[in-house]
Image (tube, rainbow, N blue to C red):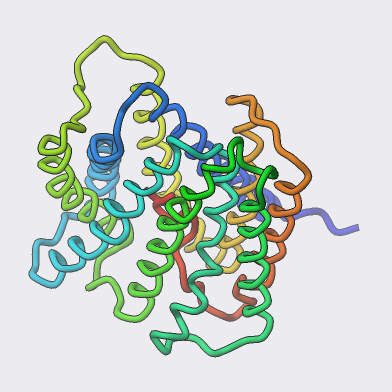
Amino acid sequence: MTRPDPRHLTLAALLVVLGAGWGMTQPLSKIAVSEGYRHIGLVFWQLTISAAILAVVCAIRREPLPLRADALGMYLLIGVIGTVIPNSAAYQAAVYLPSGVLSVVLSLVPMFAFPIALLLAIDRFSWRRLAGLLCGLSGVAFLALPGTSLPQAGLLVFLPLAMIAPLFYSLEGNIVAKWGTAGLSPVQLVLGANLIGMVIAAPLAVGTGQWVDPFPPYGAPDAAIVALAAIHALVYVSYVWLVGQAGAVFAAQVSYLVTGFGVFWAMLILGERYSGFFWAAMALMMSGLFLVQPRPGKSLVVRGPIRKSAVR
């Protein structure tokens, strides 16, 4: 009998840890908005804390942050479509929707990526991946059925709001796949995007009355935003390392774990419970993920769930 390769076991264990970490961000988002904090203020502090951690990582790796015109343009683009807009929508959706529903909806990232890639002419049509997209949309339909997955029928109007984040994450990943990153490493790109996002979010938070005071007393929402930002930064850096070690196709399997752990943490931490329709929706989403995942030898279009998203 062939013994398992210890290195393969280590990489698989890291994949599970990444999935568990990213899956935790949905319940943490729910806690962060539980006492009145609004989305723009939360986005600012999430980006600030993540940027501080990534700055340390860049310093350790001796990667200075380029300030060329093309690099600044990339920071701005990713900062807007990959952080400020999707994160704001995600926090808003977390006010109204169960954490488990948010985790399932987030798994739409690779499914949305397929039609966007076709529009940008960076992928070929595939019946297999079209079936995956239809499975994902069917899962959303199951979530939207009256009296099934949502606590109140009126919350259905917020389901499209939750879909903004995976849509923009998919757009971001395809833009990077088509036009590159201006020679920036993933850590440099995310750090620069977070810094630009901070500059955008700070005046918006103050001007709209959504500023979150960083001074005590602190409560559960404050601890949640710190933990959420730290998880995003550390897990994303680890994800980038994993892609380099094991390849994008292997690393892409984290999508299943993020959704599964997201639902698990919501049940464990928040006490959420779900109907049979919810589990049917989750099964459809998982089937869709399986069908749209790239096969060995093909590049990964999107940067993971979550990616900074969530991979943010």
In the rendered image, the residue lying farthest to the top is 217
Q: Residue at x 63, y 49 (%)?
A: 257
In x, y percent, where is residue 21? 52, 39
Q: Residue at x 35, y 53 (%)?
A: 86
In the rendered image, the residue lying farthest to the right is 1
From the viewer's side, name the closer residue of 67 and 287: 287
From the viewer's side, name the closer residue of 146 and 112: 146
| Left or right for 233, reference 11 | left
From the viewer's side, name the closer residue of 166 and 69: 166
Q: Quadrant of residue 33?
A: top left
| Left or right for 21, reference 87 | right
Q: Is residue 71 above or below residue 282?
A: below
In x, y percent, where is residue 111? 55, 69
Q: Is residue 121 above or below residue 2?
A: below
Q: Residue at x 29, y 54 (%)?
A: 85
In x, y percent, where is residue 198? 17, 45
Q: Residue at x 34, y 72 (%)?
A: 176
| Left or right for 244, reference 120 | right
| Left or right for 6, reference 111 | right
Q: Is residue 205 visible?
A: yes
Q: Is residue 262 visible?
A: no
In x, y percent, where is residue 304? 49, 59
- Give the quadrant of the N terminus: bottom right
Q: Is residue 253 above or below residue 17?
A: below
What is the total number of numbered labels drawn onto the structure image?
0
